[in-house]
Image: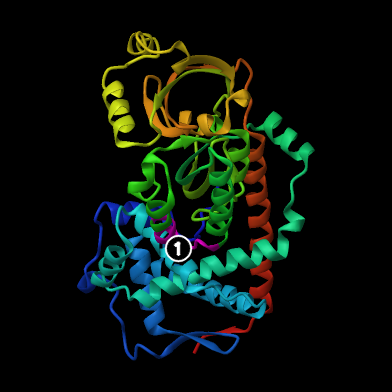
Amino acid sequence: MIREILAGGAKLAALALAAGLFLTAGQGVAQSGNPFAPVAYVNDRAITNFELSQRMTLLGLFRTPGDIRQVALDQLIDDRLRLDAAESAGINLPQEAINAGIADFAERANMEPEQFIQALEGSGVAQETMRDFVKAGLGWRELVRGRFGQRSQITEAEVDRALAENGIGGAEVELAEIRLSAGTSEQRARAERLALDLSQTIRGREQFAAAAKRYSDAGSASNGGQTGRIINVDTLSPELREEVLSMSVGGVSDPMDEGNAIAVYQLLGIRETEAKTPADRSIKFAEYLIPGGRSEAALSEAAKIAGKVERCDDFYGINRKNAPERLMIHTKPVNEVPGDVANELAKLDEGEVSASLTRGSNLLMVMLCSRTPAVEDAANRQFARRQLFSQRLATFGDAYLAQLKADAIIRYP
């Protein structure tokens, strides 16, 4: 299983919140006695009755099973140990990282972060409670990765064995993009500088969306770089696939050279698919050039053409009176398709078109004609490695937490 960026009920939270299953403050867990009276001490640091009540209310929203008071208290003790260990290791999460974590929860509930916080507060959960919950998960992840990352590396033999014995599921991702035209040497130099700066300075989804609207030359710019597509990782170019599978949700890629453009991507979400996904052996696609680049006239013509074509052969009629070289229909192995085209085709179903790319002074329309699946199962080795790495890292983390708990002085008043 993929470890989500935040531990502890994120999926349950999304289901509960998205379905509107909020408890009212009056239905939440009532505080008893002094809200600031301690209910437990962890290395002489108190956990208060208020914190316990808040966590119980939060777990109620998450529809957590079991003895909710005991689960809440156990979680708070673990979180206190996690936070202390992260602080001792010098890990100080910036506010942007915590905000991004809350935004991830909000997105799963189909809400804006502000709406999400307001909904929680309306259900009796203070904003600080959610921030502490997120901070503990993120800080622990950073600590475990830094402490045990090298020891969790996976060998090629381990990947081979996992694929042979158990098989590995596929993965689907949602990406946002910033594409910078690089058709001329001047454009390329500017695009490379800007892409490097963006990849190193963007923090969080709001910054990425703002940068996409300001700088991106792709059609998705007006939507903050979001394409609205769920993409199978096996359909991405090898370079982008490797980059994406090494990223955390919310992370920003290094600049990707895609021929006539330099691209930067943000990983908005990733989920494991249940079944193995065979890789494509080859892909058939059409490319159609429209003079004028991304001018209004060229984009208008592309929109008209998109309304007329349902399959690749329809382009022959569209191009009947034009130069033959404006239309190219290819059948190629996936690893031979240019990176920018491969990544655009990954967003499309058969018969769908895109007009997000350029070629020199031309707008490039792309249509996916068909995919030919591989005869043999070519499960993605990089994704297999990621799964195995996450599993091993989690094992180290669980053992380390158990050690911290054994060494701690935990007492109850």
The part of the chain drawn in magenta is 201-209
Residue 255, visible in the rendered structure: yes
For the point 25% across and 62% down, the residue is 22
Q: Is residue 9 above or below residue 382?
A: below
Residue 70, visible in the rendered structure: no
Residue 208 rendering spot, x and y as whole percentages: 44, 56
Q: Please say whether residue 203 is one of the residues in the magenta stretch.
A: yes
Residue 187 rendering spot, x and y as whole percentages: 53, 45
Q: Which residue is mark 1?
A: 101
Residue 278 rendering spot, x and y as whole percentages: 57, 24
Q: Is residue 189 above or below residue 95?
A: above
Q: Quadrant of the N terminus?
A: top right
- Identity of the amino acid at label 1? Gly
391 left or right of 233 in image? right
For the point 67% across and 76% down, the residue is 89
Query: How many residues crowd around disc 1 within 10 Å: few (fewer than 14), some, or many (20 or more)?
Result: many
